[in-house]
Amino acid sequence: MHLVSLSEMTLYMVRGQKYEVAVLPVGSCEQHGFHLPYGTDSFEAELIAKRVCERAVELGAKVILLPTIPYGVNSNMLSFPMTIHIQPSTLNAMISDIIRSLEKHGIRKIVLFNGHGGNEFKPLLRELYGHTGAFVCIVEWWKVASDIYPQLFKETGEHSGAVETSVSLALFPHLVHMEWAAEGKVRKSRFEAIENGWVDIVRPWERLTFTGGQGNPAEASAEKGEKVISAVVERIAKFLAELSESKIDELFPYM
């Protein structure tokens, strides 16, 4: 495999290289029910992004994988012990500083590889637009292969359900405790507008869930997880290769 992780490289390896694309994984530190570790979002983002970058290099991309940011926005889970919450403004400021550093080193194509649903980076992109010479985009890995979920799962689950548990079993099975897995049942809102998505709220997770999870991990397997990961890797690696080769001009990213 190609060495793609900046954390694993030395100055000798990096000096003189010309990278076109930088990938920044962002996770969180939060509970994932009884059976998945607190670092699930960060582990998944980092390990999947590494596979993506390795495959992208095989396709000709000049890409480098940055160290993962292991904290995210978790204000609605602070009632669970040892949840670590970073304010959106703090996280955005940190990412903005990283982008400025990358620009200093001549990298103008940056991919935020998000592993946590509570991290919403679109407002940051709007804030950066016009104030940076870099092209910054977002990948939320769990959305990339959602079209194949119905082929693999009866119910996907949103948090530590079948999809996330399957991916975890494929990536770090030694940290998964299926003997403690429980169905993540949730309470319904008393308001139809909230249930139907017409009204959006910050969901107090301890009131919404019974076990901290949302979804049933019972049908999860490492084999299903590998199928999800493989689809994500191929699709995003192709994008990175195309992004690496594309020139930033006055019409970018359009033709």
Image: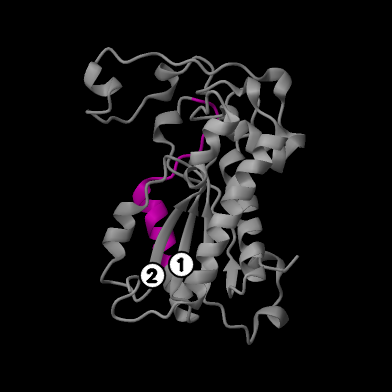
**Disc 1 residue type (three-letter):** Ile
Classify mark 2: helix, strand or loop: strand
Classify mark 1: helix, strand or loop: strand
Which residue appears at 33% of the width and 57% of the height? 124
Given residues 244 and 97, the one toward you in this image is 244
Crowding near the residue tagged with mark 1, few <14, some 14–19, many ≥20 C-alpha atoms within 10 Å: many
Which residue lies under the disc numbered 2? 135
Q: Residue furthest front?
A: 151
Question: Position of 58 compared to 73: left or right?
Answer: right
Q: Residue 18, image x and y in percent?
A: 57, 83
Magenta region includes residue 202: no
**Disc 2 residue type (three-letter):** Phe
Question: Position of 155 compared to 249: left or right?
Answer: right
Question: Position of 220 compared to 93: left or right?
Answer: right
Crowding near the residue tagged with mark 2, few <14, some 14–19, many ≥20 C-alpha atoms within 10 Å: some
Q: Residue 36, image x and y in percent?
A: 64, 30
Which residue lies under the disc numbered 1? 110
Which residue appears at 23% of the width and 28% of the height? 199
Start and end of the magenta stretch?
Answer: 80-97
Mark positioned earlier in the residue sequence (1 or 2):
1
Q: Quadrant of residue 85?
A: top left
